[in-house]
Image (spheres, rainbow, N blue to C red):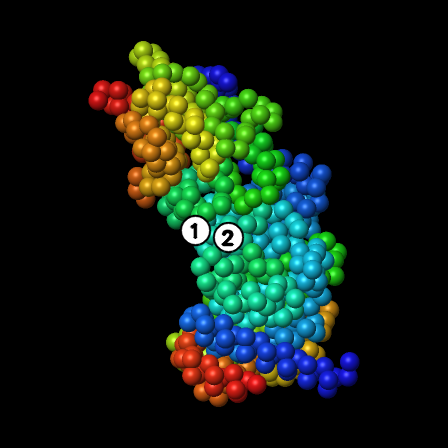
C-alpha cells in the first residue's frame, strides 16, 4: 500500500461510515442491536433508530447499566454494539467492561465515540485520552482504532463477526482517507505500512495517521525516508511489523491522540525493548488539556506534522 | 406432587446444600457462610421447582436465566448446581483449590453459571439485558436475579431497576436476600435501605414481601409476574439460617468455622 495524502481533497467524520455499516449489518442479521446512553445523536444512530426502533436500546444516562445490559443481551444471543461517548463509556463503566464483558467473554462491541480530544473546548471531563491505557490492561479485550472511513467500515464488519469482546474507537475529528477502500482496508491484528522508508519509523493510530503521512513528506524533503505504520489494532499488537521497523529503521516515533502513559507508545515500547531495542520518542497527550478546539489542542501537544518531524529529527540527531 | 411433600423435599434439599457449604468452607478455610445460608432456600426453590433448565444442556438457547449477583455466595450456588446435576458433587471438594474451576466467585467455566459475578451491583443490569433479549427474540424464557440487600447500596442496581420498570420487563424477577446484615454491620446502621418495598414500587416494580425460608411462599412469589411489571421479591431471611451460633451475627459474613464448629453445624443441620 502506498497512500499519499499531500493535499487531502476532503475529510470525513468516521461516525458516518460507522452508522452506515451498522445499518447494513443489521439489515442482514437480526442479532445486531445497538445499546446507548441517550447518545442517539452523538453516536449517529438516528438512521438505525428509524429502521430498527426495537433494536435500539437506549437505557438513558446510565453507563454502568448500559454495559451490563449489553452483556445480558449477548447472553441472550444478540450482538450488541454499545455506543457512548468514549470518556463516559470507558471511565464510568470500567468495571463492567472488565467483568461483565471481558471476564465473561461476551461478544460485546464497545464503541467509544468521539474519543481523544474530539470534544475540544468541553474540556478534560469530556476528553477520552485514558481509554487506551485503561483498556489495554484488561485481558481478552481487543482494541481497534480505525484511521479513516474505509477502515471504520471494515472494522465494524469484523467486530460483528469476531465473537470476542472488543473496543472500537470511533473518531468524530474529520480525517482524510489514508487506506484503500474495500474489505481489505482493515484486518484484525494487522499493522499496515502505508509508506516505506528506512531512516525512521512513524507508528501512528487513528486521527494521527494522516499527520504521520504529512510528516513523512516533510522529512523526505530533508532527505530522510520515514516508514509510516498505521496501527489499527492496538491490542493484540502486530509485533512482527514493529520488530521489523525497529530492526530496519533503527528509530521509532509513536503518535496517538491519547495519554502517553500506557497507550500505543507504551505498547510499541514494550515490544521494542523485548525484541529489538532502538531509541524511541512517544508523542501523545501529556496532561489535562487547556481550553481549545481539538485542532488547537493537537498543535498544543505537538500532535501535528511539525511535532512528528521534530521528534524524528531529534532521534536521528542522537 | 402434593404441596406438603413438595415442601418437605425442598427443605431436605436446602439442608443438604447447607451441609455441603459447611463442609466446603470448613475444608477450604475460606468462604461466606452467613450469606450462603440465608440464600439457600431461595436457590433450592428456584433450581428444584421453578427454573426451566436442562443440566445436560446448560446453554440451551431458550433456558431460563439465573444470575447470582451476590457472587460471594458461590459455595451455595455450586452446591445447588451440583445437586441439580450440572456437574458431579465430588467436584465440590475442589472448591477454591489451585486451578479449580470452582473459584471463590462464580464464573462461566462452571456449567450452569450464566455470568461471572463478584463485584456487587453487576447482576441486575445483566439480567435486564437478558430479559430484553427474550422480549426481542419473542421467546418465553424468564430471568431471575438474586441480589444481596447490602449490595443495593450500589447505584448500578437502581440504574437497572429504573430501566426494567421503564421497559415493563415482566419476564424479570429479582429476589432480594433481605438478611439485614452486610459485611461490617446492619444494613440499616450503614446506609438505610428502608422503606425498601416502596423504593422498588417507585421504580415501577411489583413487590412481594415474603419469608425467604418458606419454600411454599417463595414458590408462589416466583410464579409469573403481573403483565407489564418486573417483579421484586423481598425475601426476609436470617443470615446464617440453620445453625444457632451463626444466625444473625455480623462476624459470620465470612468467618470460617473451626473443625469443632463444623461438626456442631452438621449436627444442627442433620
CB of mark 1 within 8 Å of CB of mark 2? no
Q: Residue furthest front?
A: B90
The residue tagged with tag 2: helix, strand or loop? helix
Residue at image location 45% in from the left, 75% down from the top: B26
Q: Identify whether A194 is placed above or below B249.
A: above
Q: CA distance from mark 1 to mark 2?
A: 17 Å
Left or right: B261 as drawn, with respect to B133: left
Residue corresponding to mark 2: A103
SS of the residue under disc 1 = helix
The residue drawn where x is 70% and y is 72% is B50
| Above or below A197: residue A20 | below
Residue at image point 58% right, 32% down:
A153
Dot 1, crowdedness within 10 Å: few (<14), some or many (≥20)? Answer: some
User: Eyeballing the image, is A205 above or below B132?
Assistant: above
Chain identifier of the residue bearing label 2 in the image: A
Q: Nearer the viewer, residue B140 or B47?
A: B47
At 71% across and 66% down in the image, what residue appears? B52
* Quarter of the image with the C terminus of chain B in it: bottom right
Label number found at residue B250:
none
Q: Which x, y percent locates residue A81?
A: 59, 45
**Counting other residues with Cα less than 10 Å from the Cα at mark 2, is it few (<14), some (14-19), or many (20 or more)?**
many
Q: Position of residue A227 (x, y in %)?
A: 39, 19
Q: Is residue A235 visible?
A: yes
Q: Chain of mark 1?
A: A
Observer-side mark, 1 or 2, equals: 2
Q: Position of residue B125 (x, y in %)?
A: 56, 60
Of labels 1 and 2, earlier in sequence is: 1
Residue indicated by mark 1: A91
In the displayed orientation, state which residue is furthest to the right. B1
Q: Which quadrant would residue B215 be assigned to in this image?
A: bottom right
Amino acid at each position: 500500500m502506498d497512500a499519499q495524502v499531500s493535499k487531502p481533497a476532503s475529510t470525513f467524520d468516521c461516525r458516518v461510515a460507522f452508522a452506515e455499516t451498522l445499518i447494513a449489518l443489521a439489515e442482514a442479521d437480526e442479532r445486531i442491536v445497538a445499546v446507548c446512553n441517550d447518545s442517539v445523536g452523538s453516536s449517529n444512530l438516528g438512521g438505525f433508530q428509524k429502521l430498527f426502533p426495537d433494536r435500539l436500546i437506549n437505557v438513558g444516562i446510565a453507563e454502568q447499566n448500559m454495559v451490563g445490559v449489553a452483556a445480558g443481551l449477548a447472553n441472550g444471543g444478540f450482538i450488541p454494539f454499545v455506543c457512548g461517548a468514549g470518556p463516559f463509556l470507558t471511565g464510568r463503566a470500567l468495571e463492567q467492561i472488565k467483568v461483565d464483558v471481558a471476564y465473561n467473554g461476551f461478544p460485546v462491541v464497545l464503541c467509544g465515540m468521539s474519543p481523544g480530544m474530539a470534544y475540544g473546548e468541553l474540556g478534560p471531563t469530556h476528553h477520552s485520552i485514558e481509554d487506551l491505557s485503561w483498556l489495554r490492561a484488561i485481558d481478552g479485550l481487543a482494541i481497534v482504532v480505525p484511521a479513516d472511513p474505509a477502515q471504520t467500515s471494515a472494522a465494524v464488519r469484523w467486530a460483528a463477526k469476531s465473537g470476542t469482546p472488543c473496543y472500537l474507537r470511533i473518531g468524530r475529528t474529520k480525517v482524510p482517507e489514508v487506506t484503500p477502500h474495500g474489505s481489505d482496508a482493515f484486518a484484525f491484528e494487522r499493522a499496515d505500512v502505508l509508506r516505506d522508508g528506512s531512516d525512521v519509523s512513524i507508528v501512528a493510530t487513528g486521527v494521527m495517521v494522516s499527520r504521520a503521512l504529512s510528516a513523512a513528506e516533510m522529512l523526505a524533503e530533508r532527505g530522510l525516508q520515514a516508514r509510516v505504520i498505521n496501527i489499527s489494532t492496538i491490542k493484540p499488537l502486530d509485533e512482527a511489523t514493529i520488530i521489523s521497523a525497529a530492526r530496519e529503521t533503527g528509530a521509532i516515533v509513536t503518535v496517538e491522540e491519547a495519554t502517553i502513559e500506557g497507550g500505543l507508545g507504551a505498547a510499541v515500547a514494550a515490544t521494542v525493548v523485548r525484541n529489538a531495542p532502538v531509541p524511541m520518542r512517544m508523542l501523545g497527550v501529556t496532561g489535562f488539556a487547556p481550553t481549545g478546539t481539538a485542532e488547537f489542542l493537537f498543535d498544543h501537544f505537538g500532535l501535528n506534522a511539525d511535532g512528528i518531524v521534530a521528534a524524528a529529527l531529534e532521534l536521528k540527531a542522537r | 406432587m402434593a404441596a406438603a411433600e413438595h415442601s418437605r423435599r425442598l427443605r431436605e434439599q436446602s439442608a443438604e446444600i447447607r451441609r455441603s457449604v459447611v463442609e466446603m468452607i470448613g475444608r477450604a478455610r475460606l468462604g461466606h457462610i452467613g450469606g450462603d445460608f440465608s440464600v439457600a432456600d431461595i436457590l433450592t426453590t428456584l433450581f428444584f421447582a421453578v427454573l426451566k433448565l436442562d443440566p445436560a444442556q446448560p446453554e440451551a438457547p431458550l433456558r431460563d436465566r439465573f444470575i447470582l449477583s451476590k457472587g460471594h455466595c458461590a459455595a451455595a450456588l455450586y452446591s445447588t448446581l451440583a445437586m441439580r446435576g450440572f456437574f458431579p458433587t465430588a467436584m465440590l471438594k475442589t472448591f477454591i483449590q489451585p486451578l479449580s474451576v470452582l473459584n471463590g466467585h462464580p464464573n462461566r467455566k462452571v456449567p450452569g453459571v450464566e455470568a461471572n459475578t463478584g463485584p456487587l451491583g453487576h447482576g441486575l443490569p445483566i439480567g435486564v439485558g437478558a430479559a430484553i433479549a427474550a422480549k426481542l427474540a419473542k421467546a418465553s424464557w424468564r430471568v431471575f436475579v438474586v441480589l444481596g440487600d447490602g449490595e443495593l447500596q450500589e447505584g448500578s442496581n437502581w440504574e437497572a431497576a429504573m430501566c426494567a420498570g421503564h421497559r415493563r420487563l415482566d419476564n424479570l424477577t429479582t429476589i432480594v436476600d433481605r438478611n439485614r446484615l452486610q459485611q461490617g454491620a446492619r444494613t440499616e446502621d450503614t446506609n438505610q435501605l428502608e422503606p425498601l418495598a416502596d423504593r422498588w414500587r417507585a421504580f415501577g416494580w411489583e413487590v412481594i414481601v415474603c419469608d425467604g425460608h418458606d419454600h411454599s411462599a417463595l414458590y408462589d412469589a416466583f410464579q409469573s409476574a403481573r403483565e407489564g411489571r418486573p417483579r421484586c421479591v423481598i425475601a426476609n431471611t436470617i443470615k446464617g439460617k440453620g445453625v444457632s451460633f451463626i444466625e444473625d451475627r455480623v462476624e459470620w459474613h465470612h468467618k470460617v468455622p473451626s473443625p469443632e464448629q463444623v461438626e456442631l453445624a452438621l449436627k444442627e443441620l442433620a
